[in-house]
Image: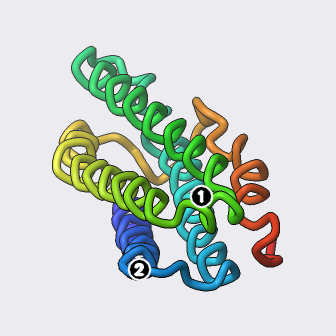
Amino acid sequence: MLDRLLRDHRLIREKAQALLQLLDHETMPSRALLAETRWRVGSHIMQHLAFEDRHLYAKLLQDERPHVREKGQQFQAELAALFAEYAQHAQYWTPDRIASEWSRFRVESRRMTLAMFARIDLEEVELYPLATNAAIDMKTNVAPTTNWTREAFAIKDAITKGACTLPA
């Protein structure tokens, strides 16, 4: 399962790099391309978080060892805060708002993406080794602790409304 989590991280980075490339442009790309790229990043993040929660976070929070449980709580709280910021960002930046404030969107989206990269790096350097060293069984899943996809439809609607129709 660790391989799956690491593969997900690589895919998130790749999808987010495509977004960063669009943000490099002085002028806004097509609404459809931007919406599709943003949704590819967002949908993969939500899928990854749901998987990670069932296979890692929920288990860390239930662990009998205080240091493991505390680290799990810390990482989950930080992740929840970052995801809440991302959800707010994604919902605020509708295609119409992006078109009228492209420069500001570029700056804020780049900041959000780099924060996500930093979080991924931190998980790979601190959290995943902790789980491995603590012999957390990531092969099985348990009930999730958070509904990471609760925001999915609101995020998708905000990203795509007036931009294009994306597959479900």
Q: Which residue is at a point 32% across and 25% down the rendered structure image?
A: 74
Give x and y (percent) for residue 87: 59, 44
Up the image or down, 130 lies above or below 41; here it is above
- Does residue 27 appear to the left or right of 123 in the view shown? right
Q: CA distance from mark 1 to mark 2?
A: 31 Å
Q: Identify which residue is drawn at 70% across, 81% down.
A: 32
- Seen in the picture, residue 91 relative to 159 is either above or below; the reply is above
Pick the residue in front: 28 or 72.
28
Residue drawn where x is 44% and y is 64% of the image? 103
At 59% across and 58% down in the image, what residue appears?
47
**Where residue 47 is drawn, which disc sits there?**
1
Q: Residues within 10 Å of mark 1 (few under 14, many from 20)?
A: some
Q: How is the image coloured?
A: rainbow
According to the image, label 2 marks what residue? 26
Q: Residue 137 or 55: which is nearer the viewer? A: 55
- Residue 106 sits in which quadrant? bottom left
- Report the quarter where the N terminus lies: bottom left
Label 2 SS: loop
For discs 1 and 2, the disc positioned in front in the rendered view: 2
Residue 148 falls in image quadrant = top right
Q: In the displayed structure, does residue 25 sit left or right of residue 133? A: right
Mark number, residue 150? none
Instruction: Please determine whether, in this image, residue 124 is positioned above or below residue 35.
Output: above
The amino acid type, in three-letter code, at marker 2 is: Glu
Which amino acid, mark 1? Gln
Q: The C terminus appears in which quarter of the rendering?
A: bottom right
SS at mark 1?
A: helix
Q: Report the side of 119 relative to 143 (left or right).
A: left
